[in-house]
Image: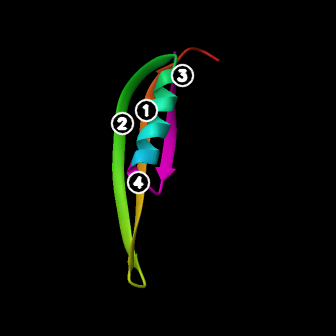
Amino acid sequence: MVYRVKLFDEEHELDLEDAINDFLDELEGEVIHIHYQVALCLNGNEMEYCYSALIEYLCKDE
């Protein structure tokens, strides 16, 4: 088994959820840990959000 990471970065939480679920559906290995983060900033009068996740996983030898 080989240790790997996968990074996701989306502007909407549902897009992040979909991207992670798609990745997990195809994963042939074992998830070790999922790190999740939300960043936000004020751009003029609008609040901008960034949703990100990093998945640590083991996969079959390549």
Q: Which residue is identified by label 3?
A: 26
Q: Which residue is identified by label 2?
A: 34
**Residues at marks 1 and 3, CA–CA distance in whole angstroms:** 15 Å
**Relative to residue 19, is residue 32 depicted above or below?**
above
At label 2, counting other C-alpha atoms closer than 10 Å, the crowd grade (few under 14, some 14-19, many 20 or more) is some
Q: Which residue is identified by label 4?
A: 51
- Sequence-wise first label, 1 or 3: 3
- Sequence-wise first label, 4 or 2: 2
Q: Which residue is identified by label 1?
A: 56
At label 1, counting other C-alpha atoms closer than 10 Å, the crowd grade (few under 14, some 14-19, many 20 or more) is some
Query: Of helix, strand and loop, which one carries label 1?
Result: strand
| Front in this rendered view, residue 52 or 60 | 52
**Residues at marks 4 and 2, CA–CA distance in whole angstroms:** 13 Å
Q: Which residues are magenta?
A: 1-13
Q: Residue at x 50, y 35 (%)?
A: 5
Q: Residue at x 41, y 40 (%)?
A: 17
Secondary structure mainly formed by the magenta segment: strand
